[in-house]
Amino acid sequence: MTKILMDMDPGIDDAAALSVALNHPDLDIKLVTTVAGNVTVDKTTINALKIINFFNQGDQVRVAAGAVQPLIKPFEDAARIHGESGMRGYDFTGSLPDPLEETAVEAMHRVIMASDEPITLVPTGSYTNVALLFSQYPEVKTKIEKIVAMGGTLGRGNMTSAAEFNVFTDPHAAQVMYQAGVPIVMVGLDVTHKALLTNETLQEIEGMNPAGKMLHDIISSDGDKNENGVAMHDVNTIFYLLHPEFMTTKDYWIDVQTEGPANGETVADIRGAYHDGKTNAQVCVDIDAQAFNDWFKEQVQAMKM
């Protein structure tokens, strides 16, 4: 069983990723932390608690609220895509468990250092909490197996022509993470835009069970949905963790631009010309989109309340 710490900004696709992870027998979520990103951190925290409560795991999986803004850059949300609440489309009922009194960074440090085996970090929002963790508690690096991060792109961005949203939100934090010396798998737009959940998949999950109905409703409200389907960016991190055989990766050195018109761009040293042949990330460059859809349907079918 893989021990993971999920750092996220729910957000529709974060919610779908968390739903899969909560229900998968091979994943052990030690902590969920939240960050400002798709919407403000008070809302992302509530949304994480809503999903955990939906699956009746409030006593097992705790949530700690994190950074309210990026390290340096002004905060810019994605409410235009996810709605003002960050997770529109479904009416969640019931009282929510309380988040931890600790900050996200304090809780991350405690959980990682107390673990008897290395933990995998799965950041699916901006990387502000991760950067603060590494800056304040560098000793955690030796106890992290790897980071499987949604974000970045080798091609066209979705915030600017150069930058993907998570990196664009806090490029300085991304720079800290990529320079930390911890193994990183970059799950970016190069694969998430290829592996759309199709409209047929959405129709199938709607009638599977209550979880399928909930996921269908929030995913269908995603502002990026089009006639071909919808990109569930963050779910791809969980897919990679469980089925790396369905993704193609290449090793690159990734630098992050932190100013100018290319702010937030992830630049790969594709010729190996500038870092003495060294690399700092496995970059996902291709994916079996049919396998992703089939797998997602299987996960939803197995979800229990």
Image (cartoon, grey):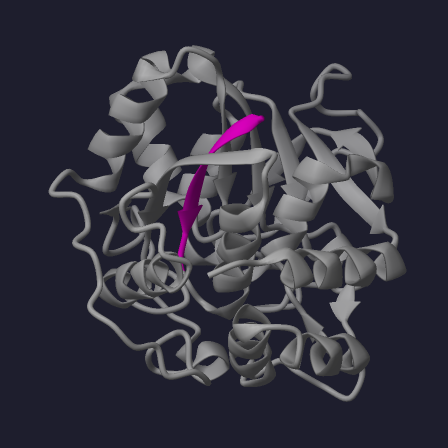
Q: Position of residue 42 (x, y in %)?
A: 22, 63
Question: Who's the residue at 51% across and 57% down the image?
Answer: 19
Is 187 drawn above or below residue 233 in the view shown? above
Question: Who's the residue at 26% across and 55% down the image?
Answer: 69
Quarter of the view holding residue 53: bottom left
- Look at the image and tell me whether residue 48 can be seen: yes
> Is 174 one of the magenta-colored residues?
no
Is 254 drawn above or below residue 272 in the view shown? below
Q: Position of residue 159 (x, y in %)?
A: 56, 69
In depth, the one of 107 and 67 nearer the eye is 107
Quarter of the view holding residue 247: top right
Question: Who's the residue at 54% across and 85% down the image?
Answer: 221
Q: Residue furthest bottom?
A: 227
Left or right position of 42 against 30: left
- Look at the image and tell me whether residue 260 can be seen: no
Left or right position of 79 against 278: left
Left or right position of 282 against 214: right
Quarter of the view holding residue 227: bottom right
Q: Position of residue 153 (x, y in %)?
A: 69, 52
* Quadrant containing the N terminus in the rendered view: top right
> Is 3 one of the magenta-colored residues?
yes
- Magenta range is 1-9
